[in-house]
Amino acid sequence: MYYNVYQPVYYKDEIFSYEVLLRKNGVENISEHITTIVNKSLFDYECIVRTVLENKDKEVLLFVNIHPESLLNSLFVEHLLKMKDVFSWVYFELIESEIKSCDVETIKENMYVLRHQGAKFALDDFGANFSNIERLINFEFEFVKVDACFIRNISHSYFSFSILIGVLNSITNSFPDSNIVIEGIETKKQHQVVNAIEIYLKKTLLRQGYYYGYPERDIGMSVKEISLQLLQIGNQSKKAFFWRNLYLDIISDDSDDSDDSDDSDDSDHEIINLLSHAEKGAFSEVLMKIDSMDALFLLKNSCGDILYHNKSNRVMLGTDKFELSQREVLNLNSNYANCVDSDKYFLNSKKIQSQVSEVFDGEHFDVYRINISDDNSQMISIITKGVEPINIDYLTGFFTRHDFSKYTWAKSVTFIDLDNLKRLNDKHGYDYADEMILRFSAALKEHVRSSDLIVRYGGDEFIIFHDTEDVNAITKRLHMINVFLKGSIQFSFGTSIVNTSLLNTISLASGVMQKMKRRRKQNECLI
């Protein structure tokens, strides 16, 4: 059974609105659950109707999440237009990362139709992925919700603080009338930093997070009508010393947030001092570009601690922390020890820079190292994908069969076998069979999770390594792909949770797949 919880969004010291957060009995990860739903538009419409019925007699302003796919459905748009009376108090949120480039024009047109009848839209989780300011301008969102990943590290990392300033500057410079919501504010220090940012931007920011209120089943109070105007505050210096001193003053105040231990050493302060002569806005813009580039960028010291690493590297390690000790990195990936040894070798060589090809987790990378200190204590690593000499299937682009022993992160494995590929080969020829494999591969790339690793194990056999044990969600997703491919190619599959070796798990998953294949053949015979 689905139900709503409501988290308040604050403007100044008053509740401005609530975000409607979906929950379901027995489901821990609702986001993962939603990805398995095939008919997004019907699901979203039912959620909107439930929300409206629950709150029709209350004076509230609500943000309701909808999937961008729903705005591709003309019937969904027509149903919303019939509910246009609620547009004055129900606003619609779209997650930035879920908007596909190929759908932009259709979504934009349907948003225009709805906006013409009074609808308002918010872009959610801005900055969580590689954000596009042009998209923000083209869609003309009334609200922009900045992802919590920035604020989460802001009281511990000056780099996180600087990147957030860059993101906010980009939004306000490109789209001055935007209403910005900072998500994920949980502590007093984070609250104080946002206060300082408001002074700098001369703009009042809306705020959301546990510091202001937890999600609740019921809305306890009505929301006053608030006019969103730019907050005019006296001119403040934009020089870096203003930000540096303000930042250090805030994070050095340990009078509150007793849970926030201050484990930082002098390296943070030294880096801040090195940057104190720079114009704050310019530095933030450069750092924001570094943070969003595809290559891995790391600032490290001679002890192997990461003082800063960009989003690509954070995603690769599976962390949202901007700074990591060597021990923390090794806990995330034990192979980092090889990187530390290579870094020490480079720093001891007294070279200014070097370029080498290295293998990390079975993948080839080109690694550029730059010594940025006179005492060989700090360095920058820039890492790009190298040219793989092996292990890439020319037809699908997936890895081919190789040594899987280093995939220690995998929590479950799926074994897939394409049905009747040999019969299609014999009947229609190799070109037709290859076309079916390409269709299957394209569907797999489109619908599996970005963290899944796909291998072409044999001619018609594929393996997927998952970082989750949610076999039910995996099964639903694969059944959805089979439905999508109906009429062209079908496949049998089996999934097994890793409990011994990967090779044994692959064998168990293959056994589950074979049982499914036998059932499918029996059903074909009955038909």
Image: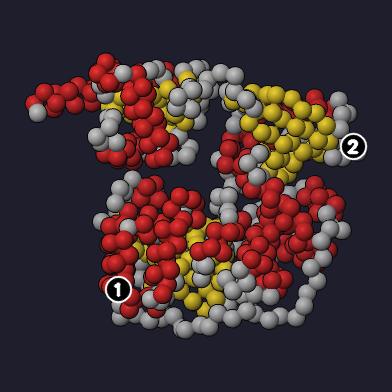
- Residue beneath the point at 66% across and 48% down: 291
- Residue beneath the point at 46% across and 74% down: 17
Q: Amino acid at mark 1?
A: Met
Q: In the image, residue 262 lies at what x, y percent?
A: 70, 53
- Residue bearing mark 2: 375
Quick one: quadrant of the N terminus?
bottom left
Q: Is residue 71 left or right of residue 165?
A: left
Please determine whether, in this image, residue 161 is positioned above or below residue 506: below
- Residue beneath the point at 46% across and 68% down: 121
1 vs 2, front mark: 1
SS state under label 1: loop
Residue 182, picture quadrant: bottom right
Number of residues whose C-alpha sits closer than 10 Å to that of mark 2, classed few (under 14), some (14–19) or many (20 or more): few
- Residue bearing mark 1: 83
Please determine whether, in this image, residue 48 is positioned above or below residue 103: below
Instruction: Give the total of numbered labels.
Output: 2
Q: Is residue 302 left or right of residue 25?
A: right
- Residue beneath the point at 27% across and 32% down: 488
Residue 216, picture quadrant: bottom left
Q: In the image, residue 210 lies at what x, y percent?
A: 51, 63
Q: In the image, residue 297 lies at what x, y percent?
A: 70, 40
Q: In the image, residue 486 lies at what x, y percent?
A: 25, 36
Q: Is residue 494 left or right of residue 152?
A: left
Q: Amino acid at mark 2?
A: Asp
SS state under label 2: loop
Along the line of sight, the residue nearer the viewer: 410 or 249: 410
Marks 1 and 2 sit apart, C-alpha to C-alpha, by 67 Å
